[in-house]
Amino acid sequence: MLLINEISLLALAGASGLVGGWWLRSRGDKQRALSEGAPAHEVLQRMHDVADNVVLNVGAHAHLMQEISDELSGTISPEAQAVAAAVERLIEANEQMQRELSLAEKKLQEQSRRIESHLAEARTDALTGLANRRALDDELFRRSAEAKRHDRAVTLVLIDLDFFKQLNDTWGHQVGDQVLRCLAGVLRQSVRDMDLPARYGGEEFAAVLPGTPVEQALVCAERIRAAIEQTQFVGDGREVPVTASVGVAERAAGEGVEAWVRRTDEALYAAKRVGRNRVAWHDGQVVHQLPVGDDHYVPQPASGSPAAEAEGPRGDSPAHGENDELGGGATTDDQPEAGTPISRRTEFCHDIQRRIAAWRRDGRPWSLLMLEVDDFSILCNQPGPELIRGLQRTMPVFFQATLREMDHVARLSDHLFAVLLPEADLPQGGIVGERLRRDALEIRLPLAHGEQGFTVSVGLTTVQAEDTWHSMLERADAALRAAIAHGRNRSYLHDGQQCLPVGIGQQAGP
């Protein structure tokens, strides 16, 4: 009986330590976040990470206890039967703990949704429903950092209504507000889903166009100008003539946000000075006028201007001739996805190679994750191409909302994606993979005849000695195939030796 009691106490102490450690870590994380002045949604995100860690540990612990129980149940020794009964009680305690953790996680999710709702209201212009100046400033800094990090183009467009003060004096402020609301609708319809239209202030609006060089941005700017001129703005039953002047500038290499906005503003007022109702663009040195009505004009930046200089050759890729084939429907399409946070394949592989080299210098961990939409061929039977378009619109938003800014996403095919997770070891990568898998369950693609849900499978690995970009992709793909083979809607990792379900055989990260 002494042996039985000792085993029981040790098992219960292990469970208590697990719960106590979780509580202390969660309490410490929360107090630290609050003391550092972190926003409430960041505090909740940290709490989510802690809860995810605990769920993984509890799951692994329960799995081990069940194995012990199964082994003991096959013996006939009275002492072994008594130990088995103690283990059964521990399993019941584990199950109760998991239920309580699930309830706590649901409460955290509800609180997160409420906070996100309040944050959305705080970043929305009340009159037009567009992003407000605060949201615009955040987007400018975020896209500027992204452009520098991934060597992508990003262009800012500023739109200012012509003679708006005169319009207000003539027609009244109520009509003026109505015109502003109508113009916001025109702006939304003139940009892509991943562009950010915003109210800059007063009668001035803006659009941030990520992944867009100035040549393409001028096409968009002229489309906006023409749409405003052709729209019938009506106030008090009468048509109100409205035009706008537009300024455009692509972020130059090494340029700060303030200088970038200032150049765009200079282009805007140059358009006003030469007659209004036109588009002008700044090349880094001088302002050029876009011929009115010309949406096929190809600008040539002045030699030596910041806009003409690159921070690095766009589209750098691994050396040609390497085996670029990958199981799971990978594509060799090298076209970048303009306006989204998703990279092309060759750019992504080049980033993997850079990360491997950096890891060999400083040893900082990082992981590679692959995510595939389950049963894609079956899903495409109904409604076919419409679902592909829905995924193309939805997945960039999904990744942007779920991942960190430093994470790097690439599309390998219509239904296969890869994610590079800097500073994330294998356990932390497993947490991210599980979060992506669970959050995907809540996505509903808006289709012509209703909505379509789907699940995803996830494969994960981390960098190892002698790795190349190709070997890392192969290992992550092997983990993904294991997840699919075991029933889909699962997360598996490859530890360099074998594929394991996430949460089994790994230690939880900090």
Image: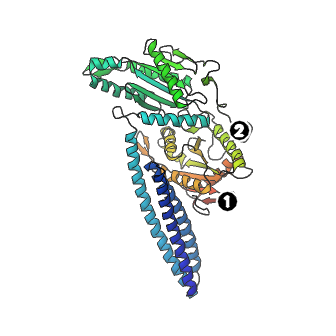
Q: Pointer 1: residues within 10 angstroms few (<14), some, or many (20+)?
A: few
* Residue farthest along the left direction in this orientation: 236
The residue located at (59%, 53%) in the rendering is: 429
State the image coordinates of residue 347 (x, y, percent, origin top left). Answer: 64, 37
The one of 56 and 132 positioned closer to us in this rendering: 132
> Is residue 164 toward the left or the right of residue 390 in the image?
left
Q: Identify the mark at residue 498; answer none if there is no mark.
A: 1
Image coords of residue 59 (percent x, y) = 53, 65
Q: Nearer the viewer, mark 2 or mark 1?
A: 2
Instruction: Give the amino acid at mark 1.
Output: Gln
Query: Measured along the vertical axis of the image, is residue 400 above or below residue 189?
Result: below
Expressed as whole percent of the image width and height from the top left, the position of residue 161 reads: 39, 21
Q: Residue 29: which disc?
A: none
User: Which quarter of the figure has residue 4?
Assistant: bottom right
* Whether label 2 touches label 1, CB < 8 Å: no
Give the residue pinned by disc 2: 318
Q: Quadrant of the C terminus?
A: bottom right
Q: Residue at x 61, y 29 (%)?
A: 253
For disc 2, the neighbor class at 10 Å (few under 14, some 14 to 19, many from 20) is some
Which element is circle 2 on? loop
Label located before the other in sequence (2 or 1): 2
Q: Is residue 365 left or right of 489 when viewed as pictured?
A: right
**Residue at the top extreme, as displayed:** 274
Query: Label 2 sits on what residue type?
Result: Pro
Q: Is residue 456 visible?
A: yes
